[in-house]
Image (cartoon, grey):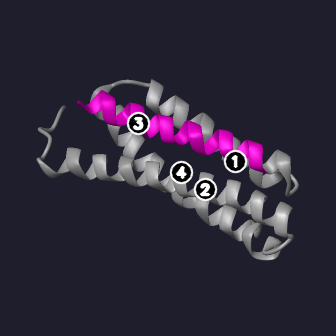
């Protein structure tokens, strides 16, 4: 049984997708800036590389992607945005298990790029 969509559903989902893209972009900037600042100046490692930032970022990404992309997948019946985003979240989760350093940064960067692509695909599928 299909319910008619309310006018607020697409705009709320689209806003969540955009929030996911912004969050992914901020995470990418954080990763790159942290590497640059810690490597060149040796400053801020205890704060910039704190695991809590990564855990909270991943939790927020999971909620936003789960709602926006899951909702989108149910509406437009396309799996690709969901699969791409979930693979990205898996990379981000894997980064939490990696030791701080290049490996963690690479896994996180791959993850946030894939999550962002999932949100972009989700926005495109909705139109």
Q: Earlier in the sequence, mark 3 or mark 2?
A: 2
Report how far apart the C-alphas of labels 4 and 1 lie in the structure.
10 Å
Q: Earlier in the sequence, mark 4 or mark 1?
A: 4
Contact? badges 3 and 2 (CB < 8 Å): no
Q: Earlier in the sequence, mark 2 or mark 1?
A: 2
Q: Is residue 85 above or below residue 49?
A: above
Chain part drawn in magenta: 105-127
Report how far apart the C-alphas of labels 4 and 3 lie in the structure.
11 Å
Q: Earlier in the sequence, mark 4 or mark 2?
A: 4
Q: Determine crowd level at label 1: few under 14, some 14-19, many 20+ residues with C-alpha closer than 10 A.
A: many
- Which quadrant of the figure has residue 81? top left
Q: Is residue 47 left or right of residue 16?
A: right
- Which residue is at a point 86% across and 70% down the rendered structure image? 42
Secondary structure predominantly adopted by residues drawn in magenta = helix
Q: Is residue 112 magenta?
A: yes
**Residue 59, x across and y down, in percent:** 58, 59
The residue carrying mark 1 is 108
Q: Determine crowd level at label 2: few under 14, some 14-19, many 20+ residues with C-alpha closer than 10 A.
A: few
Report how far apart the C-alphas of labels 3 and 2 lie in the structure.
18 Å
Q: Is residue 114 above or below residue 11?
A: above
The residue carrying mark 2 is 29
Contact? badges 4 and 1 (CB < 8 Å): no
Report how far apart the C-alphas of labels 3 and 1 lie in the structure.
18 Å
Q: Which mark is residue 120?
A: 3
């Amino acid at each position: 049984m299909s319910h008619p969509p309310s006018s607020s559903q697409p705009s709320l989902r689209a806003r969540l997708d955009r929030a996911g893209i912004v969050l992914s972009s901020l995470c990418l900037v954080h990763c790159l800036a942290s590497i640059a600042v810690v490597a060149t100046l040796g400053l801020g490692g205890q704060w910039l590389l704190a695991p809590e930032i990564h855990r909270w970022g991943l939790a927020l990404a999971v909620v936003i992607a789960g709602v926006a992309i899951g909702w989108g997948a149910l509406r437009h019946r396309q799996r690709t945005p969901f699969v791409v985003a979930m693979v990205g979240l898996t990379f981000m989760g894997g980064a939490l298990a990696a030791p701080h350093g290049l490996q963690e940064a690479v896994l996180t960067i791959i993850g946030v790029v894939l999550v962002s692509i999932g949100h972009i695909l989700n926005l495109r599928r909705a139109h």
